[in-house]
Amino acid sequence: MTCKHDFYSHKPIIPSQASHSHSHSHGNSHNHEHFRDHAHSHHDHSHAVGANTNKKMLKICIAITIFAMIFQFVYSIITNSLALLSDTLHMFSHAFALTLSYFAVKISEFSGGSERTFGFFRAEILVAFVNSIMSFGFALFIVYEAVCKLINPESIDAKTLLVAAFIGLVANAISGLLLIKADMQNINIKSSFIHMMSDLLSSVGVILGAVIVYFTGAFWVDCVLAMMIAFVIGKWSYSLAKDSVNVLLETSPIPIQSIKNEILSHEFVLDTHDIHLSEITHNFYVLTAHIVIQRENLDKFSQIIGELSQNLRQNLRIAHCTFQPEWS
């Protein structure tokens, strides 16, 4: 049974079943017969659920973040605060991430034509990877500047710094609340939200630093806070880069043994092998596998793959399955 797939609606169009059998030698020296085409089972992947909400929330967050970023950048120069500058760079990387996420959501709506069989869903992963690399570069820059200022301390306008950091905190809090209304299962929305929360925490740190500097005059606190923010950015960047690379390298997001156990739990499946699971984008899994069944159960193959697909969807969230039948 073959499937055509409409990636704009993301729902399958299933034509009539066609089968063909032939025999061949396999590794364990017994004969098998195969359908000419792999058997597919599709469900509505529901990947684009809430796409309009995502775009709306992202646009609002982009506007708020850019405004706060420009404001903080100006006042980081006025106050001579490296911590505020690091928070501004953090906010810039977030504004960039939000913008890329918005375009990723837009791009993923297009079908991609006949050659891009999975559309543009991987655009989200590429965006996340680029953002992680850029953010890590910012973290290195902040550490370098912090070391330089520790060697050559400079005075800081603590009062103005406090006001600027507080405005940044409010902007991050508003953006975070808006993103909660979007699809938090989406990798870019989720990464943007985490980034926003880390930015909010860095704003809190800058405020605390401004208070300490104001009452103690310990300007080195600003540099220490800047390095702490850089550490948060670096850790976040590493996590995002790791997740993105795993998807791009086709690393199975679910243990293969768990998939095998689920398939073998079916009463008519004797064995399974050549299991491959890919994550096209967040929560969009594609599975291919060979299953061995008894020859007398050939007429039940449609029933078998239907039940397997339903179980895999319910228990492991795998919504796109392709099975290759084999039998003794």
Image: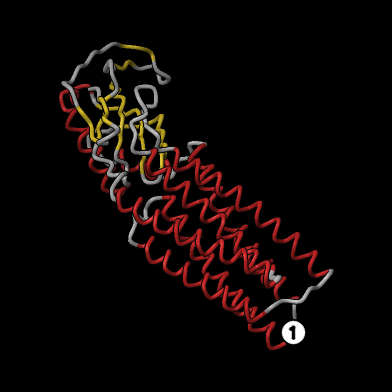
Q: What's the residue type where badge 1 is placed?
A: Gly
In front: 155, or 320?
Answer: 155
In front: 159, or 21?
Answer: 159
In front: 257, or 312?
Answer: 312
Residue in the picture at 36% in, 57% down: 57
Q: Relative to 322, does residue 196 appear above or below in the rendering? A: below
- Residue 46: where, in percent of width, then height? 27, 44
Side of 23 where 171 appears, left or right: right
Side of 66 where 285 appears, left or right: left
Side of 121 where 21 appears, left or right: left
Quadrant that contains the N terminus: top left
Residue in the picture at 36% in, 35% down: 286
- Residue 28: where, in percent of width, then height? 41, 21
Quadrant that contains the C terminus: top left
Residue indicated by mark 1: 217
Q: Relative to 262, does residue 237 appear above or below in the rendering? A: below
The image quadrant of residue 193 is: bottom left
